[in-house]
Image (spheres, coloured by chain):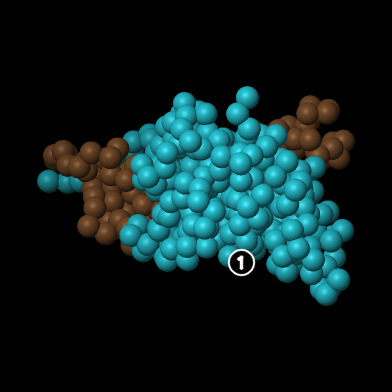
Chain colours: A cyan, B brown
Amino acid sequence: MHRTAVKKVVFEGVLDANDALAQANRERFDQAGTYVINMMSSPGAGKTALLEHTLDRMRGKLRLGVLEGDVQTTLDTDRLARYHVPLVQVNTDPGFGGECHLDANMVRSGLAELPLGDVDVLIIENVGNLVCPAEFKVGEDARVMVYSITEGEEKPLKYPLMFRSADLVLVNKVDLLEHLDFDLEQFLSNLDAVNPGVERIFTSARTGQGVEEWCSWLKRHGAPS
Amino acid sequence: MHDLAIADSVVQIASRHANGHQVTKVYLKVGHLRQVVPSALSFSFELVAQGTTVEGAKLKMEEIPATGKCRACGAESQLECFPLQCAACEGFDLEIVAGEELYVESLEMEDQELTG
């Protein structure tokens, strides 16, 4: 008995399985008339704080829902519970050793608890991480990135995948500009180097600056027609 | 960290296509614009292959250079780094035609037929 090697052509995308599930999610969202945002950032950029402002300001104007992705804890949903919007927490911990991102299947698992028909805009707050979430579609209509100026000017060049895939960048913590050696012009030029002309809004979750503009963006894209 | 999820998917694809045969090599194409770290992916691959028909297989990665076609002048250029820019007219409005790939191209497996 002698074993020989045979070659087999495969040509299968590594993320095909995830993309197919993302497409199924997307069809579910479209049927329900729900506009879906995949919100991504590094940990601590201010996603949840911005969401608090957003939920507060949009009360009675746009029906928002939130799917929270975290490796562990329900700390974020606990913070958002007082706004009384449809809210679900997905912990990635039971996955493969605590995944660093949400994938389409994890989002699907969270949808069972969300009354999509009552939600105009679903904001999926992804796990804080500048690399991994960008690889995994979850069925979103748009990708919104929160970047905080305390992260340094060079981040778009170091993490191009996420910055390239963003449809909107919320440049957050701008209230700190006067206290930091942060070169805003340099950052914007780095941002344009990886994603030329991408829409951007300057925000501060602390002072509320720019939240109005961000909410207008939300209404423009997500209000039922 | 997502190298684990990617490796897991590669192993699943390979074992499905091998259909019970022992896999010895997996050829993976990785576009230059993906954020895949070869050493981390190899390590994860070895780990998640354990106990499957892909255990012990070599993961062969080949990088595909990034190429963009300029929407202004039509020229195609190889893109080494950001900003992605047309080499002919220096424009920034490019259609990415290569460099975003991530797929299992082929695999080698043991054939258990008698050969003499």
Taking A120 as reference, is A148 above or below it? below
Q: Position of residue B59 (x, y in %)?
A: 40, 53
Q: Is residue A130 toward the left or the right of residue A101 in the image?
A: right
Circle 1 Cα neighbour tier, 10 Å, few/some/many (<14 / 14–19 / ≥20) = some
What residue sits right under mark 1 in the picture?
A44
Q: Quadrant of the C terminus of chain A?
A: top right
Write down the chain letter for disc 1.
A
Q: Position of residue A191 (x, y in %)?
A: 77, 52
Where disc 1 sits, the SS reads loop
Q: Is residue A98 toward the left or the right of residue B85 in the image?
A: left
Of B80 and B36, nearer the camera is B36
Of B23 and B91, nearer the camera is B91
Q: Quadrant of residue A108?
A: top left
Numbered disc total: 1
Q: Is residue B99 toward the left or the right of residue A101 in the image?
A: right
Taking A220 as reference, is A78 above or below it? below
Residue at position x 73%, y 69% in the image: A150
Amino acid bearing label 1 = Gly
Q: Quadrant of residue A50?
A: bottom right
